[in-house]
Image (cartoon, rainbow, N blue to C red):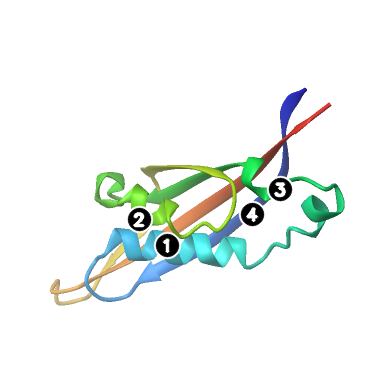
Amino acid sequence: MALKRVILEMGTGNDLHGGDYTKAAIRAVQDAIHHSSLSMIRSLGVDSKTMKVDVTIGVQQPSKVDTDAVKKTLPHGMVTVRAVKGGLDVPDSEGHDIAVIASAAVEVRLDLP
């Protein structure tokens, strides 16, 4: 058997004030997973605890994402989260605030023949 990707969902999230990369990342993941249903996994009789979930978060400052906090928001599977350079920082015109935009890719893999 081999792990095969069966679901790929993308999402976008932001923190409009305060520059919180983790908040933006969590919102991006929630956006992604709310576009998907696990009905195929249920139909196959797969235990959702055994699926592998790989999350990639794109933000301008990846080191500022608390990947453990993001991981805790996923309801199923064996989850890994990594943050990479991406997303967008949008400073306000006066430079006192920053809007953080994060992108998320959520991949689900199952052990299939």
Say whether disc 1 or disc 3 marks the residue closer to the N-terminus: 3
**Nearer-N-terminus badge (3/2):** 3
Q: Residue at x 19, y 73 (%)?
A: 97
Residue 111 makes an appearance in the image? yes
- 18 vs 32, left or right, is left
- Number of callouts: 4
10 Å neighbourhood of mark 1: few (<14), some, or many (≥20)?
A: many
Residue at mark 1: 26
Direction from residue 66 to residue 78 in the image, left or right:
right
Is the residue under label 2 in contact with that under label 3 (CB below 8 Å)? no
Give the distance between the C-alpha atoms of the residues marked 4 and 1, in whole angstroms. Answer: 14 Å
> Measured from the top left, where is residue 91 in percent x and y?
24, 68
Q: Is residue 19 left or right of residue 4?
A: left
Residues at marks 4 and 3, CA–CA distance in whole angstroms:
7 Å
Q: Amino acid at mark 2?
A: Ala
Q: Amino acid at mark 4?
A: Glu
Q: Nearer the viewer, mark 3 or mark 2?
A: 2
Which residue is labeled 3 in the image?
7
Tag 3: amino acid: Ile
Q: Label 3: state its secondary structure.
A: strand
Q: Secondary structure at mark 4?
A: strand
Q: Which mark is residue 41?
A: none
> Which numbered circle lies on residue 69?
2
Give the alpha-carbon distance from disc 1 to disc 3, as whole Å. Answer: 19 Å
Of residues 43 and 54, which is closer to you in this image?
43
- SS for callout 2: helix
Check the image and report above or below for 44 versus 24. above
Q: Quadrant of residue 70 in the image? A: bottom left
Q: Would you call the spot at circle 2 few (<14 residues within 10 Å), some (14-19), or many (20 or more)? A: some
**Residue carrying label 4:** 9
